[in-house]
Structures are given as C-alpha cells and as structure tokens.
Amino acid sequence: MKTKPAITLYHSPASRAFTAYWLLEELGVPFEVATVDIRKGEQKKKEYLKLNPSGKVPTLTDGKVVVSENPAICIYLADRYGYGGLAPKIDDVDRGAYLKWMVYSTAVLDPLLSLHPKHIDLPGAETGFGAFDDMVEVLAKTMKGRKYLLGDRFSAADVMMGSTISAALRRGALPESPTLLDYNARLTVRAAYHRAADATWPEWLFA
Ligand SMILES: N[C@@H](CCC(=O)N[C@@H](CS)C(=O)NCC(=O)O)C(=O)O
C-alpha cells in the first residue's frame, strides 16, 4: 500500500510556488501537491487562510510543520532534507552568504523587480531594498567568473534566487547581460527545474 507523503505543497500554476516545487524536485523527497488557484481566488478561502493568513502561495506543510514565504520554505526544506548538500552546514564558511542570498531574494530582488518595470524607482537610501541599478550591479559582480552564488557549488540559494532571476529574464524585467544569461542557462538545463516547470507553468512560457 502506498503511504501518503508527509509533505504537501500548496501551489498555484504559473506562480512563485514554482520555487518551492523546484527545490522539492532537486531534493528528491516525496511530496503531494494541493492546487490553490489564485486566479479563482482560492487563496482567500477560510481553510487556506488558516495555513497562510497572507493568502498567498506557496505554503508547505510537513507533518505538523507549516511554513510559508518562499525563502523560509527553502531554508526549511534544504536544512531538513539536504543539510550539508543543498544547504551549507551551520559552521560552513559559505553559510553566511547562503542565508544572505535567501533573504535578499524577497527582501531586495523581488520588490525591485515588481516596482522598476512600473517606473517606480525610489532613491536607494530611502528603502530597505535600495536602488534597482545597484541590485543589478551586485548580481553582475557576484556572478562574474562564478558558476553559482556560492562558487562551484550549487545550493538551495540558487533555486531561490535563480527562480526569481529566471522569471525576470523571461518577462524582460532584468537586463540580459551575458553573465546573467549564462547563469540562467546553467539553471534551466537542470532536470529538476524542468520537472517543476512542466508541472507548474503553462506550456506557452517555454514555447
Ligand atoms: N512573499 C511571498 C510572495 C508570494 C506571492 O506573491 N504569491 C503570489 C503568487 S506569485 C500570490 O499568492 N498572489 C495571490 C494574492 O496575493 O492574492 C513568498 O515569497 O512566498
């Protein structure tokens, strides 16, 4: 008899839930998917709000553990199921940079990628996330001569940052520098990326 996986990912097609889906595929852990269709408003239903009062996807449950916010989901999953592999251990010298990129993904990158295309560019010193051009320069400097955010080593931070960068390049929200395009190419050839994309993004995005 098949046992029910402990992990459930609450996701919506073509959404930021792709990130958590991709990491689950990288980790190779069994999970089931519950669709919360944001285009039908299902994320605002009472039952779902009990799991995630923000009414957003993704949310992940693992037994009694409930985690929302993509970086928190990625940190949780990689520590629990990929500690020392996709997550540098607590005393690993890379742990600091790893955590920094996890937080940077939604504290800096995500808001700037939402605001800049709408021509909302506040002076860098006035916000916690700073200026769009500074963020682009930080990415360019970080990735120059490097395969992944931590160097030669692929980590869950590449899933978190990379999924956001990948989606931004696709919709033209980031400049197509050779450095970023190369990084994106290294990520999008991964089998786990493809499995997650096939499962969560409409086909036309990859046509
Ligand atoms: N800060 C959240 C953002 C999640 C998010 O923005 N999800 C969007 C889909 S891409 C959503 O659920 N939107 C539905 C809504 O806000 O009603 C995270 O990192 O997980």
Image: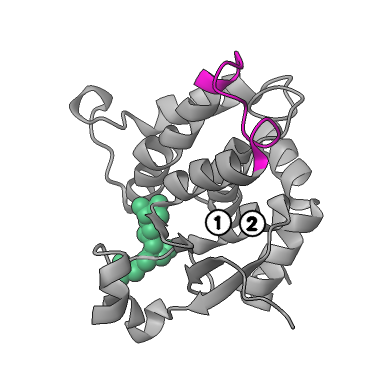
Residue at the spot 34% in from the left edge and 82% down from the top edge: 42
Residue at the spot 67% in from the left edge and 37% down from the top edge: 86
Residue bearing the label numbered 1:
20
Residue at the spot 23% in from the left edge and 35% down from the top edge: 122
Give SS at disc 2: helix
The magenta stretch spans which residues?
82-96
- Residue 89 appears in which quarter of the rendering? top right
Give SS at disc 1: helix
Magenta stretch: includes residue 90: yes
Magenta stretch: includes residue 34: no
The amino acid at mark 1 is Ala
Q: Is the magenta region chiefly helix, strand or loop?
A: loop
**Marks 2 and 1: in contact by CB < 8 Å?**
yes
Q: Name the quadrant of the C terminus.
A: bottom right
Residue bearing the label numbered 2:
24
Residue 171 visible? The answer is no
Residue 29 coordinates in the image, percent (x, y)? 69, 58
As drawn, is 205 to the left or to the right of 37? right
Residue 174 coordinates in the image, percent (x, y)? 52, 43
The amino acid at mark 2 is Leu
Q: Farthest residue to the top: give it.
A: 93
